[in-house]
Amino acid sequence: MISSREAAEQHTPGVNRSEGSVPPRAGDAQAKRTALWRRLPWANLLLLLPATALLLVFLFGPILQAIRVATTNEALTGPHAVDYGFVGLSNFTKLLSDPDFLNALRVSGEYVGGSVAGISAVGLLLAYLLRRGVHPALVKMVSGVVIVAWVVPEIVAGFIWLAFGGNNGTLAMILGPMTGGGSDLLVSAPLVLVTVATIWATTAFSMLVFAAGLHGLPEEVLEAATVDGANLWQRIVRIELPMLKSTIATNLILVTLTVLTDFTLIYTLTAGGPGTETTTLPLYVFQEAISFTVLGYGTAAAVVLIAVAAIVSLLYVLVLRIEV
Amino acid sequence: MKVIATNDFGPTSEPRRRRGVSPGAAAQHVVLVALTLVFLVPMIWVLSAAIDARASFAVQWPHLTAANFTSLFTDGVVQRPLANSLELALGTTVLATLTGVMAAYALSRHRSWFTRGYLFIVLFATGLPVQLLMIPAYTLFIQLNVLDSVPATILFLSATSLPFAIWLLKNFIDHIPVELDEASQVDGAGAVARLRLIILPLAAPGIAVAAMFTFLNAWGQFVIPYILLQSPDKLPASVTIYGFLAAQGRVQYGLLAAFTLVFSLPVLVLYGVLSRFLTGAFNFGSGVKG
């Protein structure tokens, strides 16, 4: 990504020409910046106000709200709906001994691990296979199908997999000869089905990230490797993958964020069941807060999840050193 | 999370040293076709059920009919949800794009610790998934007494789309020469006039991209309206579809399949336009959305 400052500076040759007073040396970024400052006064920052108000109230408001509610025993119904008080960190300590929370942690771990691995592996494979020696029409068809699975609204993806993997669905029909037939995969292997559905619906993202990364590899290096007698495997493992390091990092972080907080697909497919077999953290938070109406406690779980996502998100900004 | 796709997989043909099909190339094609089938098969049911007079979850040779689509509209079940979806998505698109372009302009033209920190927070917020904020947002909405309010839901949807919109628009505006601003300033134009006369026309393609992304997200959004809206006559199509699904067994699957196809159509069309747009006018590479 081109640094925005570089871009701005590229476009400002002669910015000081009409200034006259203090002609700065060419390439003196500091001086250029000051000059820009004088021309575009602070008043312009008023333009930031509407967006800032929206972000403060509706994005950071809920985060503060979460921290506040998480330290109370507020409930949606019953005596604690109106008359609730500060309970400190007790909601958090209670979480750590709650078998349902610990179960949600484990389920989330398996779900996120399986999905991220599957999405990245299939995405990389597709990006690699589509790279060269394939007829453009085939490239269009393959990427088209994979991308459609990704751009349809999540609720539609949930519907598709409910029909495909559910009782008497096509998947049971296909797998029938192997499994003995008749079984409802949403009951016999719900977490596997939910993971596969997630991979189906998200692989396109990984594929596009990797395609962009592979596209940016310098052709000469790859040719040099071939000339030096590297075989295909050596070329991929020793040269291409190491050069894709930052692409792989971007992909892993963003896919983890998506999957970690995925709600709609699982909610549509299994609603966390059967039992708590597919109750990932987001579903646990939802059930505790809305369905079981213990708002304070459920929100404490939400705060934990927000903190995890915030750390991953911070990693994304810091590790990749994106220029702002 | 979305990627701005260019569908650019690099050079599609390379000079072949020998004639004929190598075993490697054959394997490559076999794996590609197999993977495509794996992705395609789950979609087949929806397509066939939508034109099947007697659809069930079992995929079968359809008893061809267009009745599912026609009765969808003559029954009058879907107009309201689709209109609600449109209202939410359009409202969000207008609000987020408008406030986003103003913020992006200020952030692009001012460089200081303040704007740098602001942008850092914006970028960080693009990675914060919205559905995490839903429970606290729900309690906030109760407190502000705006639960079940369409305008408040639009404000919330806009706030969740803003970080990415600001980031995208700022990158576009960065590429508009600053001299143009300065010239107009010398001519006496104020910030708003400058934005309207210089930036908006030049950033129009970028604004279109940001608007399309916002619309795509808002249209397909399920969790936010599901939690923040309650009256049946305010619910968008995504929540209505879920309602049908939850009432399993008593559902006419053919109708529901047709409904999901109609609901998905704008998304597919818009995405097609978007990816074409990005390969055409811009070499944007792969902007990544959170």
Image: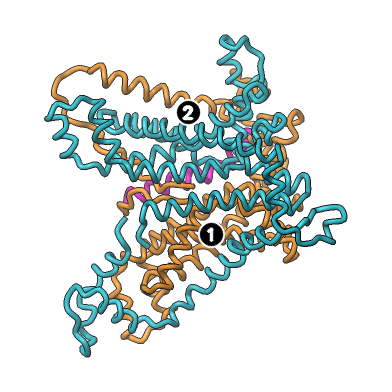
Drawing shade for chain A:
cyan
The magenta stretch spans residue B224: no
Task: Name the residue type under label 2.
Answer: Phe
Instruction: Identify residue for label 2.
Output: B39
Q: Chain of mark 1?
A: B
Residue drawn at x 58%, y 20% as measured from the top left:
A171
* Colouring chosen for the image of the structure: by chain
Q: Is residue A212 left or right of residue A101?
A: left
Q: Judge by depth and name the residue closer to the eye, A27 or B250.
A: A27
Dominant secondary-structure state across the stretch colored magenta: helix
**Vertical side of A35 occupied by A315: above or below:** above
Quarter of image, res B184: bottom left
Task: Name the residue type under label 1.
Answer: Thr
| Mark closer to the observer (1, 2) | 2
Structural crowding at the residue carrying mark 2, measured as other residues with C-alpha within 10 Å and reported as few (<14), some (14–19) or many (≥20):
many
Residue drawn at x 30%, y 41% as measured from the top left:
A244
**Vertical side of B94 occupied by B38: above or below:** above
Q: Position of residue A124 (x, y in %)?
A: 37, 34
The magenta stretch spans residue B263: yes
Sequence-wise, the earlier of marks 1 and 2 is 2
Instruction: Give the magenta range.
Output: B257-280
Same-chain status of marks 1 and 2: yes
Alpha-carbon span between mark 1 and mark 2 = 31 Å
Q: Judge by depth and name the residue closer to the eye, B267 or B242.
A: B242
Q: Which chain is orange?
A: B
Instruction: Identify residue for label 1.
Output: B93
Q: Is residue A146 left or right of residue B181?
A: right
User: Which residue is the extreme one toward the right?
Assistant: A79
Q: Is residue B106 left or right of residue A158?
A: left
Q: Assign a secondary structure to mark 2.
A: helix
Q: Position of residue A240 (x, y in %)?
A: 26, 36
Is any part of residue B65 visible from this angle?
no
